[in-house]
Image: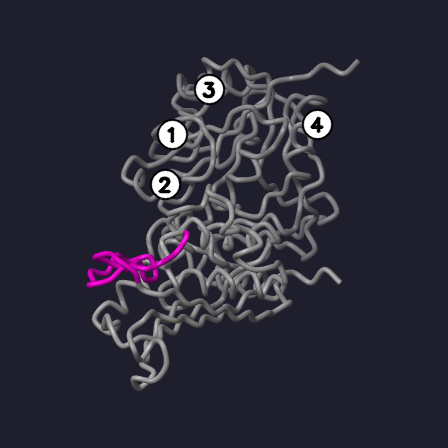
Amino acid sequence: MTETLKTAAIIVAAGRGLRAGAGGPKQYRSIAGRTVISRAMEPFCGHPDVFAVQPVLNPDDTVMFNEAVADLQYHAPTSGGATRQASVHAGLEALAGDAPDIVLIHDAARPFVTPALIARAIAAAQLTGAAVPAVPVTDTIKQVGVTGHVEATPDRAQLRIAQTPQAFRFDVILEAHRRAAREGRSDFTDDAALAEWAGLTVATFEGDVANMKLTTPEDFVREESRLAAALGDIRMGTGYDVHAFGDGDHLMICGVRVPHTRGFLAHSDGDVGLHALVDAILGALADGDIGSHFPPSDDKWKGAASDKFLKYAVDRVTARGGRIANLEVTLICERPKIGPLRDVMRARISEITGVALSRVAVKATTSERLGFTGREEGIAATAAATIRLPWTD
């Protein structure tokens, strides 16, 4: 019977990423609508064979980190050091009290790690005690001297590109890091090199060519394009909602409390703008309408805030591997005046959905005093949503 070993993961995220250009540490930048660090951590946080995820941060990044990974479960972050090696050592010491059998050490700048790669890493560590994912070198490599002249052409059949997560028996790699610290060695660029120096035999296992490290601005541009191309199923949905006025002193419109002489007659908070958006998103997914997911007959939704409905619809897109490209709402009313609140409403929708402000539009029009909106008996809203999904058929 195979022994079940406890596996923990360290996410190294203390670097500054200066080669990635302006925009702050690269691990907190967005790529295809999600932060790099969120993409890098999520597969470990959700992996059934990983019991603990230990982030290692620069303390200056705490606020950005908390916002980026708010929906994930992980150990309290520990502070990193001046080098990657020092940061890994800090993560190992932070995990020592949990006594894991195996540790996976992964760079936060590699956001495309898969559960399958994590499983291979765990299996390799169980088998060998020290292993790194590796992919073959496809180009010819030249060894160049200080003069710029070629000195040698290594046989590429014997060369591999090392990736992370690198996998080790926890006690062995912790002792190797402690020994390096005692002896003043701080120049190792990855944990496999440190393990080799400590006398360990490091094996390799199958890596993943998609598990690339984001280093330069060009890397971000290329990966944005690759991810966008993978979402080739472009869909549009529309929505419509209307609510009559009743007693009250405010209206909820697009997630914003708007003072008014009337309130909405509605089962929930009556937010016509958000309700129309929910229908637009569900329509693009061919996934029913707001009433089928939140029936008015269910008292659970009585007085409910409509931001919950919109977040639910967004989560339905995410669950299918998709991305929202654009959201648009048109409000039809005589009063209240929407113009002064337009940007506040756009910002609120952006906050609820996670869609960039530049991709959210709020418009308003009157009905020229015609119909129920013209008579100020209520407000109507139309909405449109454009989403991108992976092709599945």
Residue under the point 42% across and 71% down: 328
The residue shown at (66%, 28%) is 122
Q: Disc 1 or 2, which lies upstream in sequence?
A: 2
Q: Does residue 277 appear to the left or right of 252 in the view shown?
A: right
Q: Nearer the observer, disc 3 or disc 2? A: 2
Percent of width and height locating residue 292: 58, 54
Amino acid at dot 3: Leu
The part of the chain drawn in magenta is 246-267
- Disc 2 crowd, CA 10 A, few/some/many (<14, 14-19, 20+): many
Nearer the observer, 237 or 336 = 336
**On the image, numbered disc 1 is attached to which residue?**
77
Residue identified by numbered label 4 = 123
Q: Which mark is residue 95?
A: 3
Q: Earlier in the sequence, mark 3 or mark 1?
A: 1
The disc at residue 65 is 2
Q: Earlier in the sequence, mark 2 or mark 4?
A: 2
Instruction: Tell me how far mark 4 sits from mark 1, CA to CA.
Output: 26 Å
Which quarter of the image is occupied by the C terminus? bottom right
Looking at the rendering, in which quadrant would you find the N terminus? top right
Residue under the image location 69 percent in, 21 percent down = 126
Q: Where residue 344 sits in the image (x, y, percent)?
A: 26, 63
Whether label 2 touches label 4, CB < 8 Å: no
**Earlier sequence position, callout 4 versus callout 3:** 3
